[in-house]
Amino acid sequence: MDFTNKTVLLTGGGTGIGFALAQLLVQRRNRVIIIGRRLDKLQEAQQLVPALQIFQCDVAQPEAIDALFATLHTQGIVLDALVNNAAVLEMWDILKQSIPSAEIFNRLSINLAGPICLTQCFIRQADLKRKNYIINVTTEAAIMPVPILPLYSASKTGLSVFTQSLRVQLKNQPFVVMEVMPPPVESRMTTQDLRNSGPLVLAANFAAGLLKKIEAGKLYYAPGANAWQLRLIRRLAPNVGLHLVDKLSRQQLHAV
Ligand SMILES: NC(=O)c1ccc[n+]([C@@H]2O[C@H](COP(=O)([O-])OP(=O)(O)OC[C@H]3O[C@@H](n4cnc5c(N)ncnc54)[C@H](OP(=O)(O)O)[C@@H]3O)[C@@H](O)[C@H]2O)c1
């Protein structure tokens, strides 16, 4: 089924995977509203794809989420799809570095509490006569944590668990609840935040694959080789696996 003529709210749609997906959705004649914290990034995206609608919103701020949905309601916009794509990531060795408590709360809110609040708002406004889509972007670190990314691994695992719970709660309702675990994809997150020196998939290619899976009605998309390997290791030797992931990821991410 073609994913077309729908209204989509896409968080973190100004850059990376989100922007690549936003572009494709617009090409498929969907109305796409992208949100993010930095207005200049949203405006740059809109210059490249003028059909995009932009809305500055920090998903870690409950009042910003409420204001977003109040604006959508006032403008008579009913969403068919929510893509919870926005996230932040950082390496954190707790023995070497302190992060202020407020910053810890903020990062966990961006990756977990924000998407949960957005999901609740989305469900409340949904037209139950139509099919609705909740697409949550998690990570392979939700299969097995990357110890040097503890906040990211913890919050994304939380989002993965929330997604699975939601799918069961909504099983008799007109909602498709999908979880997406990207492989390493070229974006600011991988090249700047992580300085990942491994092979990276282009965001446009990943987004094209994802759209095909959405159209095929899939509930889970984890195309990377790591995903099945991690699942196998988690089953066979979880503790050894965790230490191996720690060693390899520290090497790949140049973490001392
Ligand atoms: N790239 C990969 O290899 C990879 C692998 C696994 C999973 N993922 C997941 O894929 C998703 C997209 O990441 P990406 O690789 O495309 O990285 P990215 O380019 O850094 O995208 C992250 C986006 O999230 C937005 N964002 C961050 N905090 C926000 C907040 N508080 N409120 C609203 N928007 C916020 C950012 O915009 P502002 O900074 O302007 O707010 C940015 O547009 C993330 O969920 C990430 O965890 C990526």
Image: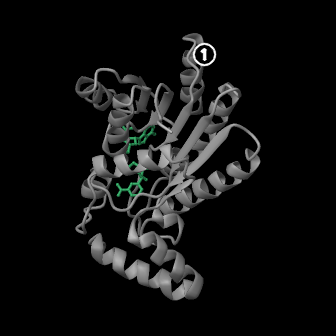
Q: Outermost residue toward the front?
A: 1
Residue 88 x %, y %:
42, 50
Q: Residue at the location (62% across, 31% down)?
A: 122
| Nearer to us in this view, 139 or 130 | 130
Find residue 128 and report its horizontal and vertical position in percent: 71, 28
Give the class, few, some or many, for how many residues have Cα within 10 Å of label 1's Cα (few <14, many ≥20): few
**Residue 134 visible in image:** yes
Q: Amino acid at mark 1?
A: His
Residue 202 relative to residue 238: left or right: left
Could you say which quadrant of the image residue 99 lies in? Answer: bottom left
Please state if 245 lies on the left or on the right of 169 as rendered: left
Figure quadrant of the C terminus:
bottom left
Taking the image as drawn, is residue 60 in sight?
Answer: no
Where is 48 relative to 59, above or below?
above
Q: Position of residue 236 (x, y in %)?
A: 57, 87
Compared to 120, does 204 lie above or below? below
Secondary structure of the residue carrying tag 1 is helix
Q: Quadrant of residue 225?
A: bottom left
Please tell me which residue is depicted at 77% across the width and 43% down the height of the picture.
172
**How many labels were placed on the picture?**
1
Pointer 1: what residue? 73
In the rendered view, does 167 fall on the left or right side of 134? Answer: right
Q: Position of residue 144 (x, y in %)?
A: 52, 72
Residue 85 vs 139, above or below: the answer is above
In this orientation, which residue lies closer to the viewer: 101 or 186?
186
Q: Tell which of 205 and 69 is nearer to you.
A: 205
